[in-house]
Image (cartoon, rainbow, N blue to C red):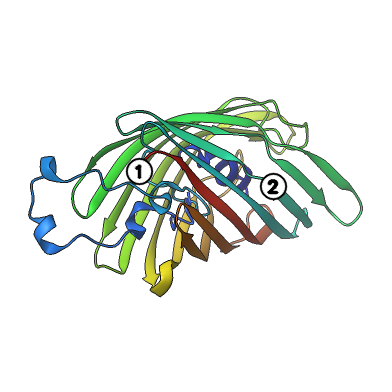
Amino acid sequence: MRRFPFLAIALVLLSSKATPAAADPSLQPAPSPSAAASPPADIPYPCTNINAFATRPSVSTSACAVQPGQIVVETGYTETTTTGAGASDSANYPQMFIHTGIGPRIEFGLTAPAVQITNDGTTRTTGTSDLGFGLKATLGYTSSIVYGIGVSMTVPNGSAAFTNGADTYAMIVNGSYTMTSRLSFFGTAAFDSLTGTDTNGKLQRFGSFIPSVGATYSLPSNWFVYAEGASFGSVAPNAGSRGLIDYGVQKLCGRVQFDASAGNALNVVSGSRFHYIGFGMSALFGKN
C-alpha cells in the first residue's frame, strides 16, 4: 500500500486511521444532553484519555491534540500480502509514533524509521523507512464534535528499497462526531505531495488526495469495534486510485489501549492488490 508505510507508519504524524480511527476522540461516551446545551466556552476540553489521542490503527487520524505535559507512544506490527504483479509478503514494525503536547491543543509528532521486510519468494529484502515529523492542532470542539488540522513531512533517510526518495509533505483535516453514547463517526481528509518512480524508473513528484471516513461502536468493558473506508487518489506517478476498507477491535485498559485490525484493497492498481492484518498498543504518559 503506497500510504501504508508512509501514512500508517509515518503520516500517522497527523494522522489515520487513524485510527483504526478507532482510537479517535469519538470513541468516548457522548456527553449528556444537558452538557450539549452549554456554550462552547463552558465545555471542558473533551480529549483526556488514550483512545482520544491514539492515531492507530486506522487511516484516519484523531482530531485530538495531546495536552502539554503528556506524551503518547504508539507501536505496532503489520503483515501485508500483495497479489498479482509484484506479489510478496512483507512485515512492518515497530511503527513507532511519539507525540507530545507543546501548547494549548497543539502537539508535535515524531515517526521513527520502521523496520521493513519484503519476501517475494525468491529474494528477501530488509531495510528501514523514512523519518517523519509534524504538528497537529485541535481547532475547536463542542459537546459532540471535535475538529482540527495538521501538517507533516518525511525526509528520505530510509533504505534504498523503502525510502520515498525525496521529502514528502501532507496537510490533513480531522473531525469526529459523537451521535450516541455508543455510536460515533470519524474522518480525515489528507492532501499529500508524494514521490515515486514512473514507468521509466525515474523519480517523480505527484499529488494525492486521501479521504477516509468510518464509524465506531462501543461495547461493554471498554471494548470498541470500528469499520472504515478510504480512497488513495493516486498511489504512484501516473497510476490510478485505490480503495481500501479496514476494520478492527480495540481494548481500553486505563492509560493503555490495545488494537487488532485488518484491511483489504478494493481494486487492482498496476496489476496488484493487497490485504493485511496487524496489531499494536498505545500508551499515555504524564499528568492529567
Residue at point 71%, 39% (across, down): 199
Does residue 171 sit above or below 255 in this rendering?
above
x%, y% of residue 110?
54, 32
Judge the density around disc 1: few (<14), some (14-19), many (≥20) Cα neighbours within 10 Å. many
Judge the density around disc 2: few (<14), some (14-19), many (≥20) Cα neighbours within 10 Å. many
x%, y% of residue 11?
53, 39
Q: Quadrant of residue 66?
A: top left
Amino acid type indicated by mark 2:
Tyr
Residue at point 57%, 63% (across, down): 261
In the rendered image, the quadrant that contains the C terminus is top left
Q: Nearer the viewer, residue 230 or 155?
A: 155
Query: From this viewpoint, which residue is outermost toward the bottom?
Result: 220
Residue at point 84%, 54% (across, down): 120
Report if residue 265 is visible in the image: no
Amino acid type indicated by mark 1:
Cys
Q: Which mark is residue 93?
A: 2
Which residue is labeled 1 in the image?
64
